Image: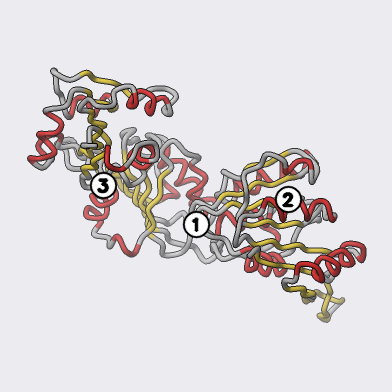
Amino acid sequence: MKPWLHIVGIGEDGMDGLTPATRAVVEAAEVIVGGARHHVLAANPQAETLSWPSPFNALIDDLKARRGKRVVVLATGDPLWFSVGAKIGRHFPPDEITFHPQLSAFQLAAARMGWSMADLETLTVHGRPVEQMIAFIQPDVRLLILTTGAETPSQIAKFLAERGFGKSRMTVLSRMGGPDEGRFEGLAESWDHTVPSFNTLAVECVAAPDAALLPRVPGLPDAMFTHDGTMTKREVRAATLAKLMPMRGALLWDVGTGCGSVAVEWLRAARYARAIGIEPRADRRTMAADNAQALGVPALELVDGRVPDALSGLPAPDAIFIGGGLSGETFGACWSALRPLGRIVVNAVTLESQTLLLELHKTYGGDLVQISVNRAETLGSLTGWSPLRPVTQWSLIKR
């Protein structure tokens, strides 16, 4: 089938910035879809004009209803980079769509800043929780962020200052490539600019000597989490995440999530990772939600329920951590739901749970190890080793 749906990236220079071929596509369109500013940039009085619907998912039905007409969807910059192109593309065969990319806001911002695209992180908080950028605050890192609105830079400045990065240099770039292009600069700790609602933020992270160091490698200090004493401790957590193997877009079930420390570290460790924490206690679900928010992974999903019943109906996971509620029935339900090449890790402290792990290990194989951790503590005027409870860890991959 000849492509009838065209996803066109457009910049502040409007039609003048399009290639001749793309401009001809827009001028010949029977239907043009976009936001108010897009319709101003690419006015076509002969075409039917549609605005973004609410909810946005209704757009797919609007497009399908016009299949066969010459339809153009206008997007800002590159429609396949944090934009509508990928969402639309999932619903139509590739031979029905043609993409027409324009320079993205990231590319324009990098050029304005003189930054190499290969040496920075590109993020979007447009229409998403602003807190998710917290996971990327690290010394000497450069960030380019698509914002939600005029208030977003001030929110991010607050996050930076609270974590000891108040000296970070911030630059807001607006309407890049157009006649009204603007630039606003300052430090996070003293940021007070009023900026246009449509903007891109560049951040050069500068850490103070006492800044919070929060790498995305698992093993954050226990003190970074709100907890009630029942949690997977730092050293064991790092070993647990190593066996769970966080990967881009992968889904974790955190069974008996408690304060959410394992799920939070899973989400921080890989871009677009997902996690569902199953926890019957409301107070612990609250702690898990607070920890996820504070550590930059607000997308943690929490389920109220007891295993194995609470597992029914959940999407199939790529990895499962069982930190609480272990039973033969729970393991059976988890193992059945786990996707091929999925990883499962079970930590046990009690003798009863360890006995069950030994039986499961005999049946299914995998790695069975015991982790012992001793931490140095003050003993009067001296220092001695204080042992944590040994943890028996069983891990295996579903082949």
Whether residue 24 sits left or right of residue 231 in the image: it is: left
Residue name at image x 45 percent, y 45 percent: 156
The outermost residue toward the right is 352
**Mark 2 falls on what kind of element?**
loop
Q: Which mark is residue 104?
A: 3
Residue at 44 percent of width and 24 percent of height: 55
Horizontal and vertical percent for residue 323?
77, 57
Residue 226 appears in the rendering: no
Q: How many marks?
A: 3
Residue 112: x %, y % from top left: 22, 52
Question: Quadrant location of the N terminus?
Answer: top left
Q: Earlier in the sequence, mark 3 or mark 1?
A: 3
Residue 248's tag is: 1
Left or right position of 248 against 392? left
Q: Amino acid at mark 2?
A: Thr
Disc number lying in front (3 or 1): 1
Q: Are marks 2 and 1 in contact (CB under 8 Å)?
A: no
Residue visible at 45% across and 49% down in the picture: 189
SS of the residue at dot 3? loop
Disc 1 crowd rating (10 Å Cα; few below 14, some 14-19, many 20+) is: few
The residue lying toward the viewer, choosing from 100 and 185, is 100
Residue type at mark 3?
Ser
- Can residue 97 be seen here? yes
Q: Which amino acid type corresponds to the residue marked 1 in the rendered image?
A: Arg
Decide: is 94 above or below 42: below
Q: Which residue is mark 2?
A: 257
